[in-house]
Image (spheres, rainbow, N blue to C red):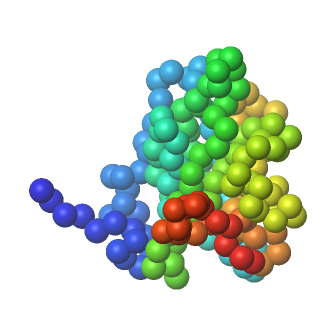
Amino acid sequence: MRRIPTPSQTVGPFFSIGLAPLYQKVARPDSSRTITVRGTVFDGDRKPIPDAVLEFWSSEDFARVPTSEDGTFSVTLSAERGESGKGPAKHFEVLIFMRGLLKPVYTRMYLTPAEALKTDSVLGAVPRERVATLFASKTSAPDQYSWNIVMQGENETAFFRFSSDDSSDQHPRSA
């Protein structure tokens, strides 16, 4: 078995020469079940972060993508369908690796309107004024979403921490 350091075992910037083989390369062939999410990762001064790595997880999918020189990212994901067979996945788990972090930060990206998620226990634990930071916006293009991540400061994205407490493994990080 070959051992390869993971991003949490290194300190950025994450040079593309080493991680490029691990990035998502092409959209999945079944375009009727895919969505594309585009956005920008910002630091506390609202400057784009050019060397972050994002991982998107769901029960059906995993994708790892970098930010570009201008802090933008684009990811194509499989869209899980609800029981009716319509609508995109409820949410994706997102890990963000970047310079200055020894471990990734964890958040979620929701695609379903907030009203449809009134019973989501994780959203219920997020302060009401920060819930909007977890929702991607549908764009005018079919199956396209926009979602920006703010690492700190005003309009900071809600991040979560892992806990060994059996009652819940996800808690919003305090601002």
Image coordinates for residue 143, horizontal then vertical, percent: 69, 30
Judge whether residue 89 can be spotted in this image.
yes
Residue occupying the far top of the picture: 84
Judge whether residue 96 can be spotted in this image.
no
Which quarter of the rendering shows the C terminus?
Answer: bottom right
Q: Residue at x 56, y 55 (%)?
A: 94
The front one of 34 and 119 is 119
The quadrant in which residue 168 appears is: bottom right
Image coordinates for residue 60, horizontal then vertical, percent: 48, 35
Q: Residue at x 82, y 55 (%)?
A: 132
The front one of 128 and 54 is 128
Residue occupying the far front of the picture: 167
85 over 88 or under it: above or below: above
Residue occupying the far left of the picture: 1
- Position of 14 with respect to 118 (left or right) is left
Q: Residue at x 77, y 55 (%)?
A: 124
- Position of 10 with respect to 114 (left or right) is left
160 over 79 or under it: above or below: below
Which quarter of the rendering shows the N terminus?
Answer: bottom left
Image coordinates for residue 45, horizontal then vertical, percent: 75, 80
How many badges with numbers are in the image? 0
Q: Residue at x 82, y 33 (%)?
A: 140
Image coordinates for residue 88, horizontal then vertical, percent: 67, 31
The quadrant in which residue 50 appears is: bottom right
The front one of 115 and 27 is 115
